[in-house]
Amino acid sequence: MNIVEAKYLISSPSFDKCPAPDRPEIAFIGRSNVGKSSLINMLCGYHKLAKTSATPGKTQLINHFEITFLPSTSRKQGEEVRWYLVDLPGYGYAKTSQRSRRRWEQMIEGYIRKRENLRNLFVLIDSRHEPQKIDLDFINRLGEWRTPFVLVFTKADKNKPLATTKNVNSFMQALQRSWDEPPVFFVSSALTKQGRDEILNYVNELNKTKIK
Ligand code: GTP
Ligand code: MG
């Protein structure tokens, strides 16, 4: 499956200001600077669709993009599917004040729990690190909220392959403490495009199931 078109639509401060939930939606979240915007650009095949930055905390609002793709089961023109894709602001930015952290939490909880067309959340984890409490806590909260999600371990090009495997395994082991079934996960690199086909195939599978 390929995304044939992607365009930026709007940035919203809360879920109720987002575009009408009239089509399926996927969203990307994770620690500040983990590579959300870079992954979105890599998946969509655009360099500058979502704003990336070496300075953490760049994405502050709920950013909606419209993506158009041709499901891999259909080859005909006119059978394109339009979805929303969302770039969410990251968590865990050290310089954030208590007040703006609270605002972030409210915005994200409202969006994740109330956005009725949200099919799946992609939770990004930096593959260079040992399991971090902030990521595990966030994922456990998704369990309480019954939010469907998968994991993406980013920046794999920055590691020796064995280091990625080691960190992914430790992370999945840490999750075993609170999860009976491990979540689906992918390993990605915005630089080498590792993980692109697998993630897009997953989106294609989501398109086949009509339930949330
Ligand atoms: P915020 O919006 O600030 O939360 O950040 P973000 O999660 O959207 O991260 P962003 O995509 O802006 O990337 C942060 C930095 O990491 C940038 O300097 C990117 O170039 C770099 N980066 C992101 N993904 C990769 C990757 O797969 N490989 C490498 N080598 N660098 C990456
Ligand atoms: Mg970003």
Image: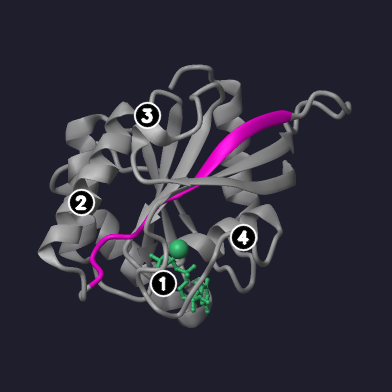
Picture disc at residue 141: none
Identify the residue shown where x is 60% and y is 49%.
198
Dots 3, 1 in contact, CB < 8 A? no
Identify the residue shown where x is 60% and y is 22%.
208
Which residue has dot 2 on it?
A: 103
Can you give x and y, in whole percent of width and height, for residue 60 in the image? 37, 59
Dot 1 or dot 2, earlier in sequence:
2
Q: Amino acid at mark 1?
A: Thr
Q: Secondary structure at mark 3?
A: loop
Q: Quadrant of residue 14?
A: top left
Q: Quadrant of ligand 2?
A: bottom left
Is 86 inside the magenta-drawn segment?
A: yes
Picture disc at residue 164: 1
Work out whether residue 174 can be spotted.
Answer: no
Q: Count up the numbered dots.
A: 4
Against 64, residue 40 (above or below) is below
Dot 4 or dot 1, earlier in sequence:
4
Cα distance between the residues tagged 3 and 2: 17 Å
Picture disc at residue 41: 4
Residue sitting nearer the eye, 185 or 87: 87
Can you give x and y, in whole percent of width and height, for residue 88 in the image? 40, 51
Cα distance between the residues tagged 4 and 1: 22 Å
